[in-house]
Image: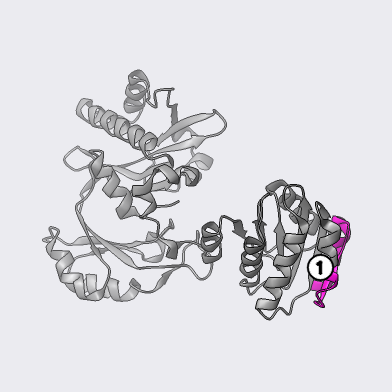
Amino acid sequence: MNLHEYQAKELFEKYGMPVSKRSLITNKENIEDALDQINFSDGCVAKVQAHTGGRGKVGGVKLCRSIEDVKVFVDQWLGKNIVTIQTDNEGLPVNVISLEELTNISKELYMSLVVDRGSKSISMIVSEAGGMNIEEVAETNPEKILKAQLNSDFKILEDEVAHIAKQLSLNESQSKEFNEIIDSCCRLFKDKDLSLLEINPLVITDKGHLHCLDAKINVDENALYRQEDLTVLRDASQEDQREYEAKQSDLSYVALDGNIGCMVNGAGLAMGTMDTIKLYDGEPANFLDVGGTATKERVSTAFQLILSDKNVKGILVNIFGGIVRCDLIAQGIIDAIKERSVDVPIVVRLQGNQSDYGKELLNQSGLNVIGEDSLQLAAQKIVELVR
């Protein structure tokens, strides 16, 4: 789960990290109230709040020197969608704009904590090339990427921190501030079950102090059950609505770019189903796992999620009945088709627990559903029908 920048900075503050004073605009009527909450003598930085990087490259971050500048920015973005290289063509809605006090910058750095599956640890990544896409830095100037691993106590050894600080040319007081920020980040990462914490840029101000000018936080979805204070911060408007609705029904759904909807029980079988569709030159429209204990109601919900994608031109259902009963899956399919007008071809492959009864239910339903016993034949058939 992603947090907005302003939400991440609120967490930074709670952990004693230096961030800019800011105020929020959620409607055009509270612009002046927001400006009264910060020092606007020299202006401010207006930032679109959306779950995407690259906001500045499309005008979503702007230096405003006057109230009129702020009003123009708010009118341009609030209630609109922002499209960046990290979003689809529709972009993401802008419901909040943050106004931040100005910071005079002497130097920009990069710092992050990430789950490093290669080393099976949490890694800290630091670079003197702050304010840039870290992927580009790693590709063009790999020598500028510095790394350290957190130990079993979720800390980085002081000697390692001192070595990195020296490589960044930090003086004694800056090294102390750097160490304090790292310590706070490590505690925050552990306490809140984060999967990513990024500060880009971590700046050195004109007065020689370190300052967190930006903030990005991702929370491990699997740990949200014990992070109730973070769960309430979820902004569903920033997520694919089908994926969000799937989560509410305990379904695993990921939207893709193809036109063949998939409904499968089991993540491995779902991946195999999508691969088989690709093998016969088809394009999956989604990954959808209804789970090993799927109920009739969840299957009906899953079917409706697939059909809500306007790009879907056909559906392949692939169910292997182990724990789940194929007759319940079949009834869920029948109910979903009857509840709404379905004008796309549907191919169903049922194998396993009560599969014969499930096929009988489908055959007697009077619906235009094609049954196949083989995954290969089912995939070939749906690709052919969609074409």
Q: Residue at x 68, y 49 (%)?
A: 292
Q: Is residue 377 left or right of residue 99?
A: right
Query: Is residue 45 found inside the magenta-colored segment of the image?
Result: no
Callout 1: helix, strand or loop? Answer: helix
Quadrant where the C terminus is found in the figure = bottom right
Q: Position of residue 348 (x, y in %)?
A: 80, 64
- Residue holding disc 1: 361
- The image shows residue 23, relative to residue 164, as above or below, that is below
Relative side of 139 to 58, left or right:
right
Q: Nearer the viewer, residue 76 or 346?
A: 346
> With respect to residue 164, does 38 lie above or below?
below
Q: How is the image coloured?
A: one colour
Give residue 370's quadrant in the image.
Answer: bottom right
Residue found at x 60% / y 57%: 254
Quarter holding residue 129: top left
Instruction: Please determine whether, in this image, residue 75 is positioned above or below residue 13.
Output: below
**Seen in the image, is 364 located left or right of residue 78?**
right
Inspect this view and state whether residue 260 appears: no
Query: 142 and 384: which one is in front?
Result: 384
Q: Nearer the viewer, residue 178 or 282?
A: 282
Residue 79, visible in the rendered structure: yes
Label 1 amino acid?
A: Leu
Q: Vertically, is 149 above or below 3?
A: above
| 377 in magenta | yes
Q: Position of residue 367 (x, y in %)?
A: 80, 77
> What residue is at 71 percent from the left and 74 percent from the top?
337
- Magenta segment: 362-387
What is the residue that sits farthest to the top in this orientation? 159
Mark 1 Cα shell of 10 Å, populated few (<14), some (14-19), many (≥20): some
Q: Tag count in the figure?
A: 1
